[in-house]
Image (tube, rainbow, N blue to C red):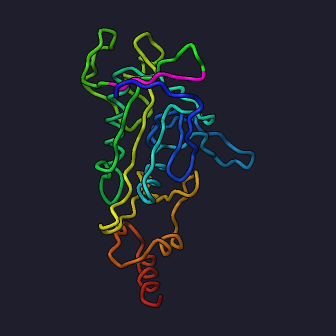
């Protein structure tokens, strides 16, 4: 089905398997200075969190879905983008996955893009599946190169112009294979996360202990003392 009418608000709650975002900033390097602020004690706090944290959490837990273009009230607003910006998103996603450790999780990630079409009835919205191969006469000329992983790309100049539309991104992260050796993924910052209720929790040594059920798990870039501690824990428990 290429079109659907959805009743608002969505009948989905943010939980261990679902999260809503109103931006497409995948990595920390894509966030600008205005997306953080200084607290009274002088510390810097992010006002926007990179999506890589949630993807990492889903990878290390039971999978899940990210709805980009849905606000906290469960209303589908969509994100304003041109066709070139859609291509940029996919390039950034691949770039982000290549920075994950121990290896790229791109095979476990699937993205669906739906055009958000407002209706006269504000309690409903029409969604139309996007065909990336179909060229529209209103599309901007296709860019040959994109600058991914940073704060700015030439395609961003197209924002809020006539050829842009509102889009909903559904990023589906597959659950780990229960029959395969368990992998603990780290995002581009070198941090591992787990999903807890409707938030992302950074994984520390005690969490790693609780996550271990057998020896054939894969840990990457752990300090020697951490490895020894894990080995000792396995031996005496």
Which residue is painted at 32% across and 52% down in the image? 105
Q: Quadrant of residue 186?
A: bottom left
Q: Judge whether 212 appears above or below 200 on screen.
A: below
Asked whether 142 or 169 is in front, the reply is 169
Magenta portion: prevailing SS class: strand
Q: Residue furthest right?
A: 40
Total labels: the figure holds: 0
Asked whether 71 or 89 is in front, the reply is 71
Q: Judge whether 32 appears above or below 205 on screen.
A: above
Q: Point out residue 5 in the picture as x, y percentages from the top left corner.
A: 47, 24
Asked whether 33 or 160 is in front, the reply is 160
Which residue is painted at 52% across and 56% down in the image? 195
Q: Point out residue 77 in the picture as x, y percentages from the top left corner.
A: 54, 26
Of the 4 image quadrants, the one containing the N terminus is: top left
Reply yes or no: does residue 128 show up in magenta: yes
In the image, taking residue 1 as reference, residue 76 lies left or right, namely right
Q: Point out residue 177 in the picture as x, y percentages from the top left corner.
A: 33, 61
Which residue is painted at 30% across and 67% down in the image? 179
Q: Judge whether 145 appears above or below 36 on screen.
A: above
Instruction: Find the magenta span and give its range.
Output: 123-130
Q: Quadrant of residue 167?
A: top left
Q: Quadrant of residue 226?
A: bottom left
Q: Judge whether 210 appears above or below 123 on screen.
A: below
Which residue is painted at 54% across and 33% down in the image? 70
Reply yes or no: does residue 147 show up in magenta: no
């Amino acid at each position: 089905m290429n079109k659907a009418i959805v009743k608002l608000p969505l009948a989905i709650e943010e939980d261990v398997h679902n999260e809503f975002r109103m931006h497409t900033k995948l990595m920390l390097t894509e966030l600008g200075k205005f997306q953080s602020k200084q607290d009274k004690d002088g510390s810097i706090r992010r006002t926007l969190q990179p999506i890589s944290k949630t993807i990492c959490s889903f990878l290390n837990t039971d999978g899940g879905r990210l709805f980009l273009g849905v606000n906290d009230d469960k209303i589908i607003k969509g994100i304003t983008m041109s066709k070139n910006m859609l291509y940029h998103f996919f390039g950034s996603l691949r770039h982000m996955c290549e920075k994950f450790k121990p290896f790229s999780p791109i095979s476990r990630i699937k993205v669906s893009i739906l055009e958000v079409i407002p209706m006269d009835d504000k309690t409903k919205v029409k969604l139309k599946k996007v065909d990336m191969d179909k060229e529209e006469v209103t599309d901007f000329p296709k860019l040959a190169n994109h600058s991914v992983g940073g704060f700015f790309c030439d395609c961003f100049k197209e924002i809020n112009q006539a050829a842009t539309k509102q889009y909903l991104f559904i990023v589906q992260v597959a659950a780990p294979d229960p029959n395969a050796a368990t992998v603990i993924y780290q995002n581009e910052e070198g941090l591992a996360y787990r999903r807890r209720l409707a938030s992302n929790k950074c994984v520390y040594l005690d969490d790693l202990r609780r996550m271990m059920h057998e020896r054939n798990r894969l840990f990457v870039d752990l300090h020697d003392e951490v490895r020894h501690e894990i080995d000792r824990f396995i031996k005496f428990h």
